[in-house]
Image (tube, rainbow, N blue to C red):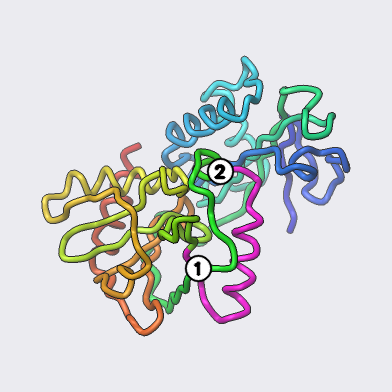
Amino acid sequence: MSGEINFNGDLHARESLYLNHENRGLRYGDGLFETLRVIHGKIIFWEDHYLRLMASMRILRMEIPMSFTMEFLEEELLRTLRQNALIDKPARVRLSVFRNNGGLYTPLTNEISYIIETVALDAAFYQISDGRYEVELFKDFYLNSDMLSTLKTNNKILNVVGSIFAKENGYENCLLLNQDKQVAEALNGNIFLVKNGVIKTPPLKDGCLNGIIRKKVMEIVTKTEDYTLEETSISPFELQKADELFITNSVVGIRPITKYRKKEFERAVATQLLGKLNALARLT
């Protein structure tokens, strides 16, 4: 894959060796990241992503540079897109932040570095997929229902192992359970359940990611008279009784689940909400 990445403001060829073996993100997962969707130079829900990143850095006791303003980071993101000829195209951007080299578990410094990576996307706005999307529970390991699980950190080994399980068994995704055996999220996004006009999603206390699109969909549902939002724990036994299940994240927006075990699902609510999400994205 050609192109350039942005490391602390300096542009490097994507294949260049700009990190070394002491990188704390590699050694200890001591890092955070934001995955962003950009449409013709407009970063979708940028303020929400920025505020989540700042809050997460404070929770992990990272030192936030004085220069790390929303305007500064936005310009760095756009500069990297321009360098990769993606400023006028739909693109996916990953902004990674990690503590600087040094120390063992206890770092020598809380100062940070950042990396910006870009890749082209096919479609400008979110689209509903018409293809098969079958999921299963991943029960080999469980998600901890604590604040760290709600952050978008580099500690994603559960998601990696779960993704391998899904691939080996012919599933498009898996749903993760917390230690209380409640459905917390999907491998790559938040989970929503629709039943008789009620739309449920797990609360953050169950360990799910504090997702940006999760937040936006909840706002949309709250303002839609046809539906009632419930932020409540979801039992695995509820899944096969649902009218619809869908997953949300910042790249795909809303992904309807078509099948879980013997139950096949509709996608009418997901399609309606996606239209409202696209309208909201255009306004921000």
- Give the structural element (helix, strand or loop) at label 2: loop
Image side of residue 193 versus residue 164, left or right: left
**Image quadrant where residue 254 sits:** bottom left
> Which mark, by number, is residue 174?
1
Circle 2 sits on which residue?
Answer: 152
Q: Are marks 2 and 1 in contact (CB under 8 Å)?
A: no
Residue drawn at x 58%, y 46% is: 93
Q: Height in image: 49 above or below 141?
A: above
Residue drawn at x 58%, y 81% is: 169
Q: Which residues are magenta?
A: 152-175
Q: Position of residue 266 (x, y in %)?
A: 27, 74
The answer to whether residue 172 is magenta is yes
Q: Position of residue 74 (x, y in %)?
A: 54, 30
Residue drawn at x 77%, y 22% is: 109
Q: Earlier in the sequence, mark 2 or mark 1?
A: 2
Looking at the image, the residue that sits furthest to the bottom is 262
Q: Height in image: 141 above or below 222?
A: below
> Which mark, by number, is residue 264?
none
Identify which residue, 249 or 197, lies in the foreground.
197
Q: Position of residue 41 (x, y in %)?
A: 50, 40
Residue type of the residue flagged with mark 2: Lys
